Image (cartoon, rainbow, N blue to C red):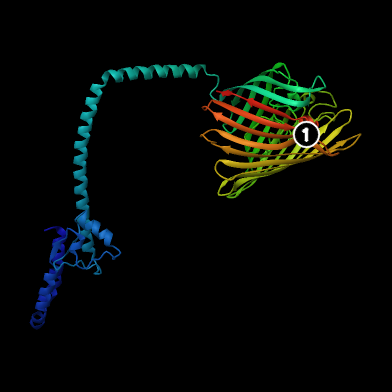
Amino acid sequence: MKPFQRLLVAAPAAALLPAVLAPASSLANEAQLNLDSVQGYSIAQATSIRDFSDVYPTDWAYQALSELVETYGCVSGFGDGSFRGQQPLTRFEMAAVLSSCLDSISAKVDAMGEEMKMSSMEDMDTLERLVASFEEELITLKGSVDGLDAKVSELEDSQFSTTTKASFEIATDFVYFASDDMAAKDAGIKEDNSGLALSSEVEIAFETSFTGSDTLSFSLTGDLMSQGNNYLDSGDFYGVAGDEGSADFGGFAYETNLDLGGMMTILTLGTDVNDLDPIVGLGTYYGGGGYDDFGPGDFGAAGIGFSVELLSSDVGALTASASYAIDGAAGADQGGEMGIFGEQTDRSGVLALSWEGALFGGNDALFTVAYQNILENGENDLTKGYLHLVAGAYFTDTISLSGSYSVGKWDYDRGADPESAQWMIGLNMDDAIFPGNSAGLAYGTPEFTTDPETDDVMQVLELYYTFSVNDNFEIPIYLDFISNVGHQPNADAFAIAVRPTLTF
């Protein structure tokens, strides 16, 4: 009999001691009652919770009691098949139950340990047999790993920098341009204009970091243009206007993250920073780019700017941006009227407020309003002021609609002060037809005057599709339909471009 069982049997026996010392008449009257109690306290070891006649699945401790009985075998009932779950438990009884359960758990752990020990021995035997079977292959693998370690060490010793990475991009444009009635740029006459143009561009870009939260970038670019007609220059299509090559240092740009009193700030400066680079949210979701004059135009070749996150919540972030940029040549002049802040320096300043968040079921969205002021010093000093509005949203995980609208005011020291406008709207699809590919279309106009009114506004409709061959090679194809090229009446044109691009 288990200790717990002995204890439960002893408990009613102890309860009978006062009765033995009681008067005879009292003992006689209660003899049958005490005999029934002793019989009721007789213990029967339960093997299933169903052995208890007074325990039901609706009882709050049913599952716990079932586990103690059936898994650990450390809870017993009474001889009459009852458990008497509502009866109080003495401290002795509690100690007996706890001891019984601990003994059961210890026995199971010991048994598991023996099984694991036997299993481990079997596994070791199996492993030793495998090592013996593949001894030659393991020796070869060890030699390969040693050789790899040596090569890695050599690369680490000879690498350019542990914090600098270099990237290379090679792009070639094959452009066919056709127009029936557009004036040739050099000839000044209208004729049947068509031709194949070719341009290539190579860029070597370097990025390095000093703190892990900043980036210093600079690049070297070279291009070669071999154009077959003079008409592309009227609209600056695909960057293939001209017939000469060049190699240039692209300047540098430095960007760092700052924490100003809990407000996250991005500071950008460099000789390759125009006035729109630091402005958040001016880029639309349109992924094309065959025609370059869609959207707000940038100014300057050297500048500084910052963006500060003013508010951030579950619905999005509100960011303020500002920038100052100058013409590169003027900024390098040390003359009193030139230089970075000289009176005769062409310069631009931009202030913007943008919101980026989630709409339409959590998809990305943006809205930006920006004011751009450009001062161009010359024979007729010119100040240009622009108000730019940019908005876009993803309606699904892959489809987005975006656009921009700009109005401008030109202020000459002498002469008329025209007003201008430009706009575009674009539809874009990621993972178009095949994963990784993209497609889209855009419709809009480059800048044109609204006062005085332009009679023949140039309009561009562009369609594109990008084949993503792999992570390093893609082939964008552009189709552009242009009316009134260069705001010339009846000067319509069609262009198709294929731009294989390799990056590594």
Q: Is residue 133 left or right of residue 417?
A: left
Of residues 272 and 230, the one drawn nearer to the viewer in this rendering: 230
Q: Please name the residue that numbered disc 1 is placed on.
A: 348
Q: State the image coordinates of residue 54 (x, y, percent, origin top left).
A: 21, 68
Q: Is residue 279 above or below residue 177?
A: below
Q: State the image coordinates of residue 203 (x, y, percent, origin top left).
A: 63, 21
Quadrant of the frame with the N terminus: bottom left
Quadrant of the frame with the C terminus: top right
Residue shown at the point (74%, 22%) measured from the top left: 193
Of residues 95 and 428, the one drawn nearer to the viewer in this rendering: 428
Of residues 273 and 439, the one drawn nearer to the viewer in this rendering: 439
Q: State the image coordinates of residue 86 (x, y, percent, origin top left).
A: 25, 69
Please indicate, yes or no, whether residue 152 appears anywhere in the rendered image.
yes
Determine which quarter of the picture holds residue 186.
Answer: top right
Q: Is residue 12 above or below residue 261?
A: below
Residue shown at the point (66%, 28%) measured from the top left: 253
Quick one: SS at disc 1?
Answer: strand
Of residues 336 and 482, the one drawn nearer to the viewer in this rendering: 482
Q: Residue furthest bottom?
A: 25
Q: Is residue 312 above or below residue 303?
A: below
Q: State the image coordinates of residue 183 (x, y, percent, origin top left).
A: 80, 24
Kind of residue at badge 1: Ser
